[in-house]
Amino acid sequence: MTEDDRPATVSDVHEIAGGMPYVKVEKAGTNPVYQVGGKSFVFFRNPRPDAFDPDTGERYDDVIVVWVASESEKKSLIQDRQRPYFTTAHFDGHLSVLVRASKLHEIPYGELVELIQDAWLCRASRRRSSEWLAEHGLA
């Protein structure tokens, strides 16, 4: 198994998001909010009534919100029921997907890296995005 294939963890989320350039970490209560240029791209959500266990009604206390570049990207991530990504009515029209920290192990590390890098890219300024892409040979 390669590093990219291993299961992702919550520590990986913090390391990847915090390792992107120009990132500032704010707090929403006790939860970190990763921002670039004052725009959130990954944050850990407090329990809310729209995200809950359908069997018990208990609110999820481990929801992570990750920005995506487009509605089509969001749909492609949440349509596959085998994947841990989801959304709620609260996030209708919002370019983000949700994933529970307790289900991160269902995502390969390499996929998590790409998801968070893409989240950063869609929230960073054009100049910062262009510079990062060029530095990584992707422009």
Image: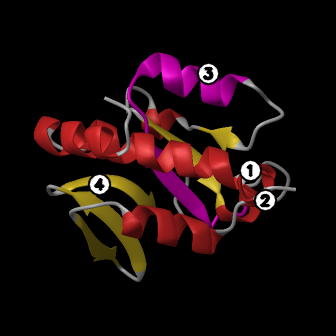
**Disc 3 or 2, which lies upstream in sequence?**
2
Q: What's the distance in space between the residues labelled 3 and 1, CA to CA?
A: 17 Å
Q: Which residue is mark 3?
A: 76
Q: Amino acid at mark 4?
A: Ser
Q: Is residue 112 above or below residue 73?
A: below
**Disc 4 or 1, which lies upstream in sequence?**
4
Magenta region includes residue 68: yes
Q: What's the distance in space between the residues labelled 4 and 3, CA to CA?
A: 22 Å
**Disc 1 or 2, which lies upstream in sequence?**
2
Report if the CB atoms under discs 4 and 1 are less than 8 Å apart.
Answer: no
**Disc 2 or 4, which lies upstream in sequence?**
2
Judged from the image, the secondary structure of the residue bearing numbered disc 1 is loop
Nearest the viewer among 113 and 97 is 113
Report if the CB atoms under discs 1 and 2 are less than 8 Å apart.
Answer: yes
Q: On the image, which quarter does residue 3 sit in? A: bottom right
Q: Which residue is mark 4?
A: 40
**Residue 59 visible, this orientation:** no
Q: Amino acid at mark 1?
A: Pro
Judged from the image, the secondary structure of the residue bearing numbered disc 3 is helix
- Residue at 78% of width from left, 59% of height from top? 7
Q: Amino acid at mark 3?
A: Ser
Disc number at residue 108?
1
